[in-house]
Amino acid sequence: MIAPLICLISFGVCYVAGRRALWAGFLATMVVGYFYGILRANLNSSFGHFIFDFAAVGFYLALLTRRETPIQRYKIRRVMPWVLALAGWPLLIMLMPLQPPLIQLVGFRGQIFFLPFILVGAMLDGSEWRKIAAGLAVLSIIEIVFALAEVEFGVIRFYPMNAVDQIIYNSVDVAVGNSSVFRIPATFVQAAAYGGNMAASLPLLLGAMIQERRGGTRRKLLLTGLAVSAVGVFLSASRSQATMLFVLGLAATFSGRIRNFPWFGWVALLAVVGTLVAVNPRMQRFVTLDSTGYLKNRVASSMNSGFFELALEYPFGNGLGGGGTSIPYFLQSELKNPVVLENEYARIMLEEGVPGLILWLAFIFWVVTRPLPLITDPWYLGKFLARVALVFCFMIAPTGLGLLTSIPGTALLLAFAGWIATPKVTVAGARSERRSPAPPADPALRTA
């Protein structure tokens, strides 16, 4: 009974939060996503797999029952055709009886469930992103507490050995002296998800921090969140996420847009994190990235293991759920002719067919080629780093699975896509281009 109750609570909280404010609903959904992994592991119930789904559905229902502002309506018009196309094609594929209905339903969820977050990212304005950044900073601090506790007391104290945690217990490959220890998942479904979410939050944390006044409480909170997020990436021992952290750090350093933040403070932050990593062998797994040609071998394996042959064999896919989407253990016996490659693009191709893959590639290209924001935009650095994070994630997609099905990382990533693709708009601009209805009198609605 506990798992269904948590599902209902998640639904209710996210619905109420979404009705009160768009940013509150998004942040509430992220909170559920952050703790989904540890809850699912300890509940040991099939309902545990749907905790985040209930939360997201509650948020989606709140969006449907809210009244958008003229600016929000104008902004979502930019991305709505893509969302409809990306959701419509899997719906057509679902009509083909290539897999059992339950498998197709899970696969359909994997292909379209996170797409509304593109619209959410488009609708959020600068002040709302600042509130979300502060919330993510608090979550990062909570996560580091769990991570350090797992280092001290052991992962098994927090994640019991069962079928849903198999990937955690298969990840005993962090060398410490002559022994190997676990990667740290904090409260996520696995260590890579922890590292990925910590790295993906950095554009918001840094972008919001440089907008805060020096000495302010929120600025200190964001700075702390920034530091512990970086430490969390290294504790997760995910080499790809550590690479993403380095790329974002270099992009921020050489962007020339780190304003309202003394250079010695930025250097000091990098030095503190670097020192912690240097003295702790548990945080140094990333140094083995090139020692064995890991990245080259992963990409070569994914692309040379029949990718193009499978594209010819399954031009319209192997059915939703039949190409690599994570299927709950109690449904895996239902799968017919499963074909899996460790490649996110292969997963899309094997489930949506070649047309679905082309559609996703076209969307990604469209997003990353949108014009950069004006240099005077307070969120210029945040949007620039979000674009870097988005490009990096899709560049390394051939090295593994889960980019478009990660909880809650995919929600944030697709929200970034909507944010990047939608320019800053004023009421006057929206009316002149789209002839929107007269704007509300509330001046707070005049900034996108």
Image (cartoon, helix red, strand yellow):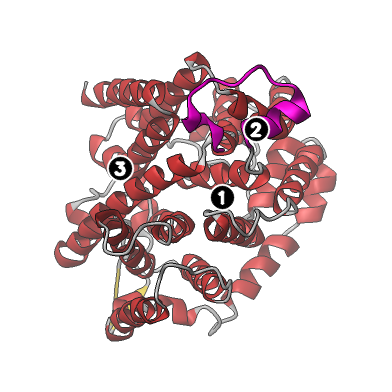
**Highlighted magenta segment, given as a residue range:** 426-448
Q: Which residue is mark 1?
A: 403
Residue 153 shown left or right of residue 165 in the figure = left
Kindly give the residue lying farthest to the right in the view shown. Answer: 312
The three-letter amino acid code for the residue at tag 1 is: Leu
Residue 413 shown left or right of residue 131 in the figure = right
Please tell me whether residue 440 is drawn above or below residue 285 in the rendered image.
Answer: above
Q: Earlier in the sequence, mark 2 or mark 3?
A: 3
SS state under label 3: helix
Q: Are marks 2 and 3 in contact (CB under 8 Å)?
A: no
Q: Earlier in the sequence, mark 3 or mark 1?
A: 3
Of residues 48 and 32, the one drawn nearer to the viewer in this rendering: 32
Q: Residue at x 54, y 47 (%)?
A: 413
Q: Position of residue 33 (x, y in %)?
A: 38, 40
Q: Which residue is mark 3?
A: 35
Q: Position of residue 417 (x, y in %)?
A: 61, 45
Mark 1 or 2: the one toward you: 2
Q: Position of residue 204 (x, y in %)?
A: 45, 54
The three-letter amino acid code for the residue at tag 3 is: Phe
Q: Magenta segment: does it hold 115?
A: no
Of residues 94 and 145, the one drawn nearer to the viewer in this rendering: 145
SS state under label 2: helix
Q: Magenta segment: does it hold 433?
A: yes
Please tell me whether residue 427 is drawn above or below residue 284 in the rendered image.
Answer: above
Q: Earlier in the sequence, mark 1 or mark 2?
A: 2
Give the alpha-carbon distance from disc 1 to disc 2, as whole Å: 25 Å
The three-letter amino acid code for the residue at tag 2 is: Lys
SS state under label 1: loop
